[in-house]
Image (spheres, rainbow, N blue to C red):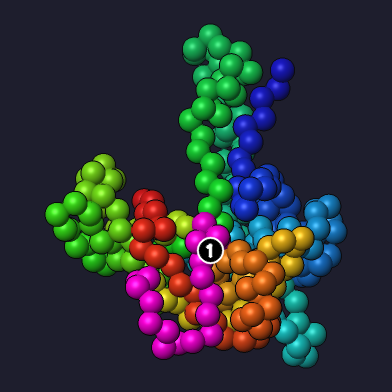
Amino acid sequence: MDLDLELKLSTNEKSFYIEKFIALIEAIKECGSILKATQMAEISYKNGWDILNIMNNQFSKKIFETETGGKNGGGTKITPFGEKVLSFYKALIKEREFFIDFMSKQLDLDKEELYFIQRRFSMMISARNQLHGKIIDIKEGAVNVETVLELKSGDKIYALITKDAKDEMNLSLNQAGVAIFKASSVLLTHDENIKISARNKIAGTISKIIEGAVNVEVILDINDEVKIFAIITKEALSELDLKVGQKAIAIIKTSSLMIGV
């Protein structure tokens, strides 16, 4: 049996194969359009945008850039960094196959057994928001530790973790880190002066509203590289009268965040 090590991107309780992301990048490189790229990759336009937005949040630099209007009519192009990611992935796949063959012989295990072991070591995170940055402050209390992460947008995000977690991860200043939190943990408001105990208040512009049967997904652009995903009810959407293009504030409690390194 041939072994296919599956690299997955988990988002909002749905998993998309990383291969779909690579297929999208290759298609965008070829046609210069996200709509055409999703058709070539045989995925929906919505899922295509979801994958691209989340992956842009995952990396320290932009994978793709979009242009509107202009003499060439706008479009989408892969950045030089995106080209490097694509080249790295292709090299990784070749090395993966060599490694699996080698380990299969060394350990006297068939590829199916190695696949099972690999899956046990893999960790999938369903949290929609995974924002990368740099740890700029660590304040230790009697029990908990407040960790401050500076995002690519320049915004600061605060997380409250235990001392044990801080020691286990060996957190230190200027270390790269990622703030992880669920879309359902994000509150939205228009009021910039709102008084609320939640420490994190990050301003942005609503770029997309996706309505479901019960809930609504709202995507808030903090800047060109950082996006925050929120899940709210339809009633909340109506009460807040949220619309694409409006300014909004994302509110997240420090206790709702995890820090990864």
Q: Magenta part of the protein: which range?
A: 182-199
Q: Main secondary structure of the magenta part?
A: loop
Residue at x-position 66% and y-position 45%: 15
Q: Residues within 10 Å of mark 1 (few under 14, many from 20)?
A: many
Which quadrant of the view contains residue 30? bottom right
Say if residue 237 shows up in the picture.
yes
Is 76 in front, or is 87?
76
Amino acid type indicated by mark 1? Asn
Q: Is residue 135 magenta?
A: no
Task: Identify the residue at the far left of this view.
Answer: 142
Residue annotated with mark 1: 57
Q: Is residue 217 left or right of residue 109?
A: right
Q: Is residue 25 left or right of residue 110?
A: right
Q: Position of residue 202 (x, y in %)?
A: 45, 77
Q: Position of residue 52 (x, y in %)?
A: 65, 62
Residue at x-position 53% and y-position 53%: 127
In the rendered image, the vertical position of residue 239 relative to residue 112, given as above or below: below
Residue at x-position 83% and y-position 52%: 42
Which quadrant of the view contains residue 231? bottom right
In the rendered image, the vertical position of residue 202 relative to residue 88, given as above or below: below
Residue at x-position 40% and y-position 58%: 257
